[in-house]
Amino acid sequence: MLSILASGTLVADSVERQSATGKTYATALLRVPCEDADPVLVSVIAFNADAVAALLALTRGDSCAIVGRAKLSTWTKDGEEKHSLSVVAEKM
């Protein structure tokens, strides 16, 4: 498991969603600046009620910091290797 603390700005409004069992969760996309590199786009999902409420209070352009469990993914598209970072936010 990779624990992470990241701060940046929301690229779009956070979105409230419902699981198949009816539990509310929230998603967002966070733009995190990097020194000497392009910014990283981080997919954020929150299940914890406090983190969900905090994430849903934010809109596009708002700054925020997240703490949670991160997962790195790699895939190939049109012969080019792509990377992504997703975080299950525990605290906002």
Image (tube, rainbow, N blue to C red):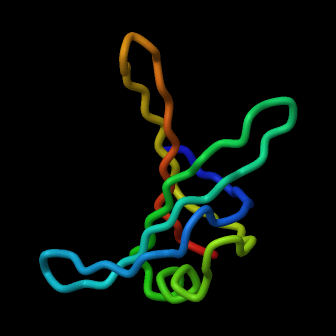
Side (left or right) of 37 relative to 53: right
Side (left or right) of 24 relative to 46: left
Residue 17, percent from left and from top? 31, 78
Residue at (79, 40) in percent of width and height: 34
Residue 55, percent from left and from top? 55, 79
Residue at (74, 60) in percent of width and height: 7
How many marks do you count on the picture?
0
Q: Quadrant of residue 22?
A: bottom left
Q: Is residue 3 above or below residue 82?
A: below
Q: Nearer the viewer, residue 10 or 24?
A: 10
Residue 31, percent from left and from top? 66, 54
Q: Quadrant of residue 23?
A: bottom left
Residue at (13, 75) in percent of width and height: 20
Which residue is at the far left? 20
Q: Is residue 2 above or below residue 75?
A: below
Q: Is residue 81 above or below residue 44?
A: above
Residue 73, percent from left and from top? 43, 33
Which residue is at the far right? 36
Q: Quadrant of residue 24?
A: bottom left
Q: Nearer the viewer, residue 55 or 66?
A: 55
Q: Is residue 26 above or below residue 80?
A: below
Q: Quadrant of the C terminus?
A: bottom right
Side (left or right) of 20 relative to 68: left
